[in-house]
Image: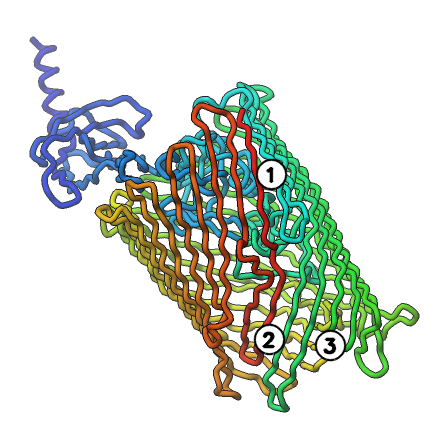
Amino acid sequence: MIKRFIFILLFFIQWSYSQKIVGKINDQNGSPIQVATLLMREGTDENPIQEYKTVRNGQFSFQLKNNYKSLLLEVKSFGYLSEKIVLSNPETDKTYHYDIQLFSDSKIVLKEVIIEKPKAIEVVEDTTKYNVKSFLNGNESKIIDVIKKLPGIEVNEKSGIIKFKGKSIETVTLGGDNLFDSNYTIGTKNINVNMVDQVQAIENYNENPLLKGFETGDKVALNLVLKKGMVDLSGSMEYGNGWNDSGEPMNKIDALLLGISNKNKSFTTINFNNLGENKSPIDYYGFQFNAEALKEDQLKVSKTLPESVFSSNLSDDRVNLNNQLFASYNSIFTITKQLKLKTNLSFINDRISAQRAYENTYYLESGDIHTTDYTNILKKPRQYRADFNLKYNLKKDASLTYDLKLQKEDIITPTEDLQNKTTVFESRLTSESRYFNQKAQFIKRFSTDNAFQATFLHAISEIPQTFNVTPDITIDPLVNVNFQEVNPKKQFVNADFLLLGKKNKKKFNFSAGWIFNSTSFLSQLSDSDVDAPASFQNNYDYQKSKIYQNGLFKYFINRWTFEAKYSLSYLHQEFTDYETSVNQKKNDFVFEPSLNLSYKLNETDILSFNALYSQKPLDERHLFSNWILTNTRSLIQNTPLLNFTKTKRISINYNKSDLFNQFLMNGGITFQTDNGNFFQNTTISSQLNKSTYFFLPTNNNQWNADFSITKLIPYLSSTFRLNSNYSLNNYQNRINNSELRNNQGQAFRESLYVKTAFDLKWNFENETSYILNVFKSDENQNKNKNSILENHFKLYYNPSKTWNMTAISDYFIPSLNNPSNDYLFVDFEVKHNPKHKKWEAAFVLKNIFNENKFEQIQITDYSLNKYSYNLLPRYFLLKLKWNF
C-alpha cells in the first residue's frame, strides 16, 4: 500500500512539473492539416522516440510524460515535408505554444516536354531528374546536345560552362563519381547520348560526404546516370570522311571507351577532326575561360603577350579551321575500402589557321585616322596534362586527400600582316606555359553539427614568351625593335583552416588562414644588333602576403533566408622595380562584408536582395612600368600603384522555377560602382598605338538588367523562351593625351526562342536575336551605334523511327545600317539508325551556299572597327558509327 501511494505521489509530482505543448498545424495555405503525427526525442534525431502523439484537425494540446533537458519535436504528415523544432532546456510547469506550417512534399512528377512521354522531369528534395529519352528527337549525338535542351539549364556554347537556375555548376559526375572535376566538358562533349538514362541536377552539392548538410546552397552539380546495360566495357567508334569545295579531305575520328567494374570506373576518348569541332576543355580559337580556368585564375601568372583571339558571332564549326587531336583518360580506382585514386590524363594538339582583314577608323579631335591590316595567322597549340587525386578515409568521420596537377603548354603563332597596304610584317609568337599545383586537405566531422577542414595549397606557374618581327618596327626616329622577350613567374601558397557548424535552422562557418603570393617579371625589347634603351626593359618583384579571417552565418526562418558574410584581413604588399629604382610598400586592414536576403513567396517563387562591398588590390597585369611590344601595332606600359579598387554592388532578383508547368522566369537589376581603377591613355597613329595604364581614385558605374521567361504551351505543344539584357556603363579614358573623357556604353540584346514538340513527323526550333551597341563621349556627342540581327532555324523531319533528317539555316545581318550585306548559311544532315543494330550512319552537307567569308563590326567611344574572316568552305561528310 505504501509503495502504491509513493508511486501515485511521484506520478502526480512528475505530471505537475512536466512541460505542456499546445499549438496548430496548417499547410502552406493556412488550412488545418487533418491528420499529423508528433514525435518526441531527447536531444537529436539519432536518439530513440520517447513519445508520440496523433493530431487531428490541425490542433493539439498535451502534457509531456517525461522531463527533457533538450526536446526534439518532429512533425510529420503524409504528403508534406516534415518539420523539426528543438526546445533547449525547457522549463518545468510551463506551456509552450507553436504554430507549425508544413509544405507539400517536394517530390513532384512533372509534365513533359514531349507530351506523349510521361515523367520527363522529376524533383526529389534537392535533385531535379531529367529523363533523357523524353528530350530526344533522334538528332543528338553527345550528351551535351540533350543538356542544352533541359529546362532550367543554360550552356555557354563557347566556353562550355553550364548553369542550373543561374548558378554555375561545380562538376559533372558520372554515376555519382566526380571523374572530371572542373574539366567536366571532357564528359559532356564526348559521352554518347545513348549511354545516359538520366541527367540529374543536384543542388546543395558537396563531393565529400563528411560535409553533407553543411552546404550553404551555392554549389550545384550534374550527375549522369548511366543505363543499366553500361557495365564492364562499352563504347563507340565513329569515322567520317568527305571533301570540301576545294577538293581537300574533311575527316573525323571519334572513339570512346567506358569501363565499369567493382573497383574501377574509367572513361577514355580520342578525337581527331578538321571540321571546326572542339572536343577538348580548352578553347584555343576564342580563348574563352572554362570553369576550371575561372577557379584557378588567381593561382596562375597572367600571359603578357596575348595570343590571337578569334572572336566571332558564328559557331566554331563554321569559322574554326582546325586540325585537332584530343585524347583523354579519366579513371577512379578503389584500391581498398579506405583508399581511392583518381587519374586524369589529357593531350591536345591543334593547328588553327585564319585569314583576317581589318579596317579601323579612329574619330579624333585632330582628325580621323584610318588603318588596314590583312593577316594570315597560324596558331599551333600543344598541351600535356596530368592530374592525380588520392583520397584516404582515415575513419568514418575523417578523410585525407592529396591533389596534384601538372601542365605543360606550348603555342607557336607565326603571322603575316600587310599593314596599310604598304608594309608586310612577318612575326612569330612563342608561348611556353608551365603549371604545378598541389593541395592537401584534411576533414574531420566531430558530430552531426560540427566539422573541421584544413587545406594546404601550393602552386607555381610561369609563361616565358618571345615575339620576333621582321622588318624592324619603328618606335621613334631613333629606336627600331624586332625582338620582345618576357618571363613572368608566380608562386602561390595558401594555408586555410575552416570550422563548419549548424544548429536547428542555422548554418555557420569560420575560417582563418594565410596567403603568400610572389611574382617576378623580366622583359626586354631590343633590336637584333643593338639593345634597346632602359625604358624598354622591365625587372621587378612583387610580393603580397595576407592574414585573414572569414565568416559566414546563414539562418532560415519561415520563408526567409538570411546570409551574412565578411572577410577581415591584414594585407602587406611590396613592389620593387629594379629598372626604375622604385620601391613601394603598403600595409592595410581590409574589411569586406556582404549580405544576401531571400524570401520564398511560394513553392516556386523566390525574391532576393544582395549587397556587397569589396576591396581588391591592383591587377598584376598593370605592374610593369616600361614599354612592352604586344603585337606589330601595339605598345603598352603602366604607372603601377599599390592602391585598391573599391566596389559596391547591390542587386534585386526574382526567380520562378515552376518545373511542373514548365514555367521558368528570372529577372534582376544590378548596380555597381567602382572607386579607383586603372585608366587607359592611348596615343593613336596610323602605324602604332601606345597605351599607358594609370590609376585614378575616380568612379566608374554600371547598371545591368536581365529578364528571361520560358514557358511550355501544352495546347500548342511548343516551348517559348524570351531573353532580354540591358547594360549601361559609365567609364573614363584618355585619347592622344586629352583630358579625362567621360564615356557611356550601352548594350541591349533581345532573343526569342521557339521549339515545337508536335505529334507529327515535322518539328522545328527557331531563335531570333536583336543586338544593339551604342557608345558616346562627352567631347563628341555623336553616337557610335551598331545593331545586329541573327536568326537560327532548325527543321526536323523523322519519317520513321530509324531515319532522322535535319535542315539548318543561319541568317545574319552584321549591321542593320547596311542590311544588304547579309549572310545565309544552310546545312543538311540525314541519319539512319537501324533498329536493334549496333551501327548507324549519317550524311552531312555543310555550308551549302559556300559562304567563304564573314564580316563583323565592333564599335567603341572613339572607333569603328570592321573585320572579316574566312570560313570553312562547303563540304560533305559520310559518317559511320559502331556502338559496343
Q: Residue at x 44, y 63 (%)?
A: 790
The residue pinned by badge 3 equals 421
Q: How is the image coloured?
A: rainbow
The residue pinned by badge 2 equals 679
Provide residue 856's location: percent of width, then percent of height: 55, 68
Pointers 3 and 1 in contact (C-beta within 8 Å) = no
Q: Residue furthest right?
A: 529
- Identify the image quadrant of the C terminus: top right
Left or right: 329 as drawn, with respect to 781: right
Q: Which element is circle 2 on?
A: strand
32 or 85: nearer the viewer: 32
Provide residue 324's location: percent of width, then percent of height: 66, 45
Inter-mark Cα distance, 3 to 1: 41 Å
Residue 450 versus residue 285 in the image, above or below: above
Front position among marks 2 and 1: 1
Q: Which element is circle 1 on?
A: strand
Is tag 2's residue or tag 3's residue first in the polypeptide sequence?
3
- Kind of residue at disc 1: Gly
